[in-house]
Amino acid sequence: MKIREFTHHLYNYAPLDYAEDFDNVGLIIGDAEEEIKGVLVSLDATEEVVEEAITENCNLILCFHPIIFSGIKSLNPTNYVNKSVIKAIKNDIAIYAIHTALDNAMHGVNAMICHKLGLKKSKILIPQKGTIKKLTTYVPVDKADYLREKLFEAGAGHIGNYSNCSFNTEGLGSYKGNEQSNPVYGEKGKTHFEKEIQLNITFAKHLETKVLKALFTNHPYEEVAYEIETLENKNQNIGLGMLGSFEQPLSEIEFLEKLKKVFKTPVIRHSNRLGKPIENVAVLGGSGAFAIPNAIGKNADAFVTADLKYHDFFKAEEKILLADIGHFESEQYTKDLLFSFINEKFANFAIILSKTKTNPVHYY
């Protein structure tokens, strides 16, 4: 299997369209046309991880964090980024990073945190904007059912727990073809009126190419009239962070002890304890200080994240328990999530879970 085919499946699992604007995701290093010998799954793509890939005869590293965030102006081995990149290129090892594309996925990083904590009824904390689009097109009445079904097959028409959703309005369309036209209905040079269905159907933005292909392939008209607009509607299945609840509330001490055990951390930095039970919990893997107002706004009793600064703890304002469990600790199970996905889907090459510990933070 070629890297291109493999990454296509990754794209369907966590579409890169939903990665944050600041991020650098996708195939960062390597040739998409190379045949895969083996895949090493890791949280990071440090020089040590690249060395592990060489040892394990893997020519593709699937990692969570991108090794290159911003532009590289020179490739001298003067820092850890350049060293990793140089070693990967020298040894024909490709690197694919999934990062915030997986952060924003319903089944991604934060779902894994909820799972490990035993949180139920999980939902997105901060739905991503601009992820839903709407197609409006006009089709002859006798072809409407056929076209609608083809658009459904392309993935359009999903709203939450419902599929095959559309709105249809019957009306009268008119057109007049010129000498170069080849109308399916009516005659060129004459104004023609046709009973049509105005078909309105929504779709996820990463499906736009697929939906338009279905439209143009299956629409009967020579020239297809259509409109696409981006909706302001919130998408309940795409976004950062999650909110879930315990079946039985925990005391604050029990909750903090559970965090230490589950995420294998010797220390948790937290805000002032409020003396109330912890039932509703917001989580956001990695640096999540920006989401403190969202967690408070959702009436969460606690917010689990990482990289909180001194002044961030003041933002709790006696309304929520903030718990900083560490950046690595909050994302450590992500590589297990990725490994499980590709291990179930592919069997024609080696898939190896990295044993290299990439956490740069140590506790004394």
Image: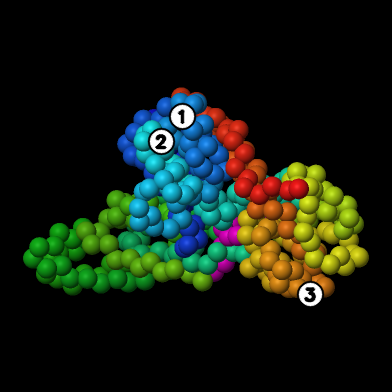
183 displayed left or right of 312: left
Query: Where is residue 354 shown, x and y percent of the image?
Result: 57, 34
The residue tagged 1 is: 54
Q: Residue at x 15, y 59 (%)?
A: 182
Q: Residue at x 74, y 69 (%)?
A: 313
Q: Residue at x 41, y 35 (%)?
A: 93
Q: Amino acid at mark 3?
A: Glu
Binning the other alpha carbons within 10 Å of mark 3 as few (below 14), some (14 to 19) or many (20 upward) gives few
In the rendered image, the vertical position of residue 198 relative to residue 247, given as above or below: below
Binning the other alpha carbons within 10 Å of mark 1 as few (below 14), some (14 to 19) or many (20 upward) gives some
Q: Residue at x 13, y 65 (%)?
A: 188
The residue tagged 3 is: 317
Q: Is residue 147 visible?
A: no
| Element assignment for label 1 | helix
Q: Amino acid at mark 2?
A: Ile
Does the magenta portion include 189?
Answer: no
Q: Earlier in the sequence, mark 2 or mark 3?
A: 2
Query: Where is residue 246 shown, x and y percent of the image?
Result: 81, 53
Instruction: Measure the C-alpha gap from mark 2 to mark 1.
Output: 8 Å
Q: Main secondary structure of the magenta part?
A: loop
Q: Nearer the viewer, mark 2 or mark 3?
A: 2
How many numbered circles are shown?
Answer: 3
The residue tagged 2 is: 93
Q: Is residue 182 visible?
A: yes
| Residue span colored magenta | 233-242
Q: Earlier in the sequence, mark 2 or mark 1?
A: 1
Q: Amino acid at mark 1?
A: Ile
Instruction: Measure the C-alpha gap from mark 2 to mark 3.
Output: 48 Å
